[in-house]
Amino acid sequence: MDAAAADTLDLMHCLGFLYLRHGQPYRAVVILLVAAHVASERPDVLRTLCAALVAARMGTQALELLDRLAQLDPGSAQHPMIRLLRARALLLLGRRDAARAAFRAPPPGSPPESPPESPPASPQGPVLAEAA
């Protein structure tokens, strides 16, 4: 891709983002679909398109795009914003339990949640309160 094409793509991406941020998700979807068609390997364009699809209440298309994005950039699949997008897309489809699970999934490689530690025991055993 030459410099002019890259600049045009960046302009389309920015314009789609501006439409999205200013409450016009359908216009954002149109511009970002063109940008994603030109640069189908750019995760930044695909993430913005996914956000626009969710804002436009197109949950099925957003989930398909999230799956494609996970194939392109496997490390980003557990990013909190991607999990939020997936949860919102699932909510649009009426899948509340799946949405809750997608949002609460811990990132891979993180230590499992452990119960809070109890205070260390006294070497003399439990301390009993003295009656006054």
Image (tube, rainbow, N blue to C red):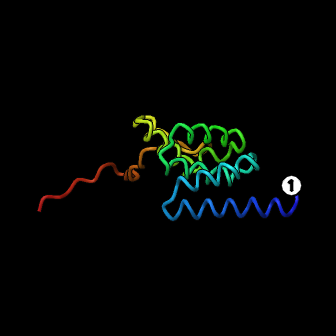
* Dot 1 alpha-carbon crowd within 10 angstroms: few under 14, some 14 to 19, many 20 or more: few
Is the N terminus in the top left, top right, bottom left or bottom right quadrant?
A: bottom right
Of residues 59 and 130, the one drawn nearer to the viewer in this rendering = 59
Is residue 130 shown left or right of residue 82? left
Of residues 79 and 68, the one drawn nearer to the viewer in this rendering = 68
Above-or-below relation of 87 to 13? above
Q: Is residue 78 visible?
A: yes
Is residue 129 shown left or right of residue 33? left
Q: Which residue is drawn at 51% across and 48% down?
A: 54
Give the tally of numbered discs. 1
Residue lying farthest to the right in this orientation? 2
| Percent position of residue 13, x then y | 67, 59
| Percent position of residue 31, x then y | 64, 55
| Percent position of residue 48, x then y | 61, 54
Q: Residue at x 35, y 51 (%)?
A: 124
| Percent position of residue 75, x then y | 68, 46
Is the C terminus in the top left, top right, bottom left or bottom right quadrant?
A: bottom left
Of residues 110 and 60, the one drawn nearer to the viewer in this rendering = 60
Q: Can residue 113 be seen in this view?
A: no
Q: Mark 1 points at which residue?
A: 1
**Amino acid type at mark 1:** Met
